[in-house]
Image (cartoon, rainbow, N blue to C red):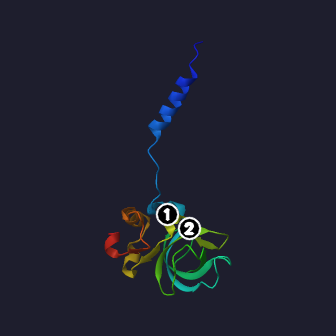
Amino acid sequence: MKRVPVRVLIAAVVWQALASYAGPQQPGLADLIPAADVIVVGQISETDYSRTPADGPMTAQATVLSVVKGRLRKGQSFRFSETAWVGPNYRAGEVRVLFLEAAGANSWWILSNLNAKPDFFIERDAIPLLNTTTLKSFLERVRVPVPKSVLLTKAMLR
C-alpha cells in the first residue's frame, strides 16, 4: 500500500475547504421569517418601560390584527417582552409587524436577533397584502445598514 505524504493530505483538505467557502454570510432581514415562531401584525395597546436594564425587560400588550405565521389568532390579545435597552420603542396605538419567539406556554419575546431590532411599522391598508411571500420579498430589498424604522406600505408589498 502506497503512503500519501501528510503534506498532500493537508493540502487536499485545505483545497476542499477553500473550494466550498463562499465567504461569510451576513444574515439579512428575510432571515427573521424562518427564525420567528410567530409573525403578526399587532396594534400596541399598552407598554411598560418602568424597569431599568438591571430590573428586567420592557413589556407590552398588543392585539393581533393579522397572522402571518404561527399560532396566535386574529383578535387575540397577548403580552410580549423585549430587553428594554436594545430594542424598538413601542407606543400605544401603533400598528407593528412583530417577529416573536416563544418564551413559555403563552409567553412571547421579540425575536432575539439583531435583525429584529428595527421598528417594523405597517400601514393599515397594506395589512391584507402581508403574507410570508410578500414579507420575504420586501425584507430582501431592505439594504444594510438596516434603518432604525422600517415602514411596509401597500405599494411595497405589491
Task: Say whether residue 71 is left or right of residue 127.
Answer: right
Q: Which secondary structure lies at badge 1?
A: helix
Disc 1 or 2, which lies upstream in sequence? 1
Q: Position of residue 94 (x, y in %)?
A: 47, 84
Residue 87 position, x and y percent, is 54, 74
* Tag 1–tag 2 contact (CB < 8 Å): yes
The residue under the point 44% across, 65% down is: 132
The quarter holding residue 104 reads bottom right
In the displayed structure, 72 sits above or below 2; it is: below
Q: Name the residue under label 1.
A: 32
The residue identified by callout 2 is: 111
Bin the neighbour count of mark 2 within 10 Å (Cα to Cα): few under 14, some 14-19, many 20 and up.
many
Neighbours of disc 1 within 10 Å: few (<14), some (14-19), many (20+): many
The amino acid type of the residue labelled 1 equals Leu
Q: In which quarter of the image is the N terminus?
A: top right
Tag of residue 10: none
Amino acid carrying mark 2 in the image: Leu
Q: Residue at x 46, y 39 (%)?
A: 20
Q: Position of residue 40 (x, y in %)?
A: 50, 73
Label 2 element class: loop
The residues tagged by marks 1 and 2 sit, at their Cα atoms, a distance apart of 8 Å
**Residue at the location (63% across, 85% down)?**
50
Quadrant where the image shows the C terminus: bottom left
Residue 149 falls in image quadrant: bottom left
